[in-house]
Amino acid sequence: MEQFYFYQKWLKSNGLEHSPLKEKPSRSDDWASLEDEIAACRQCPYGEKRLHPVIGEGPLSASLVFVGEGPGREEDESGRPFVGRAGRLLRKVLEEMGQSPSSFYIANIVKCRPFNNENPKEEAVQACLPFLQRQLALINPRVIVSLGKVPGMILSGEKEIKITKEHGRVSSYSGIPLVLTFHPSFLVRPNGSSFIPSFVEDLKKALDYCP
Ligand code: URA
């Protein structure tokens, strides 16, 4: 997990230790300029090769925000987050819990597809994290759900998280409750499906923060 020590070091050198999202947007920040900047960004190699940036989806007034790792093939092709197999599971579970897509926002740590679905490289995280910070500051949700280990560690600033043991724990991101849970791509695997009920419980915990 060497790369996470790098993130920690980088967050610290930017005054973001343990609370990477303390940065607030400037007064002039708004969605239109943020989306334009993301669309124009070529700061990391993923940006050069992407078909579409996957900025995020959902109402900007959402109380609940999900954060995944980065787009996969179907997301890259469509420009929409979580529309592949894992995303379909997430959306189905949410629908069964009575949550329509108009009740949550979904984004990712990186906006462009990591090569071969690798964990996003440090340089991509460095380039992209400020965009997510600005998204979260503008939305200012009641609760954030991190999907999987990578977004959990990056958003919480924690060095190591074992999701199978710690899922459902409420950490924090810039004062906002952060519920740690599984990445749905794990849940669609044969050895992951038995964790779906736990995933549902974690989501219920997040929904308790929503009006
Ligand atoms: N996995 C992610 O982490 N994000 C997506 O948008 C799709 C799959």
Image (tube, helix red, strand yellow):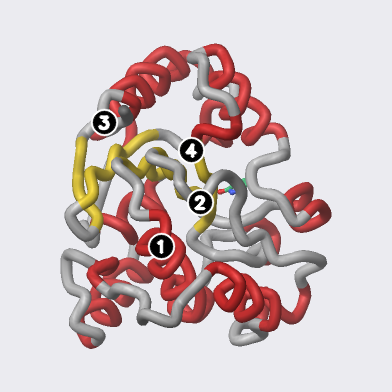
Residue at 65 percent across and 66 percent down: it is 112
Q: Is mark 4 within 8 Å of ligand 1?
A: yes
Q: Dot 4 corresponds to which residue?
A: 183
The reply to whether the C-beta atoms of the residues labelled 2 and 1 are less than 8 Å apart is: yes
Q: Which mark is residue 5?
A: none
Tag 4 or tag 1, which sits nearer the N-term? 1
Tag 2 or tag 4, which sits nearer the N-term? 2
Q: Dot 3 corresponds to which residue?
A: 209
Tag 1 or tag 2, which sits nearer the N-term? 2
Q: Circle 3 — which element?
A: loop
**Residue 111 in picture, x, y percent from top left:** 60, 65
Q: Nearer the viewer, mark 3 or mark 4?
A: 3
**Residue 208 in picture, x, y percent from top left:** 27, 24
Q: Residues within 10 Å of mark 3 (few under 14, many from 20)?
A: some
Q: Residues within 10 Å of mark 2 (few under 14, many from 20)?
A: some
Q: Residues within 10 Å of mark 1 (few under 14, many from 20)?
A: some
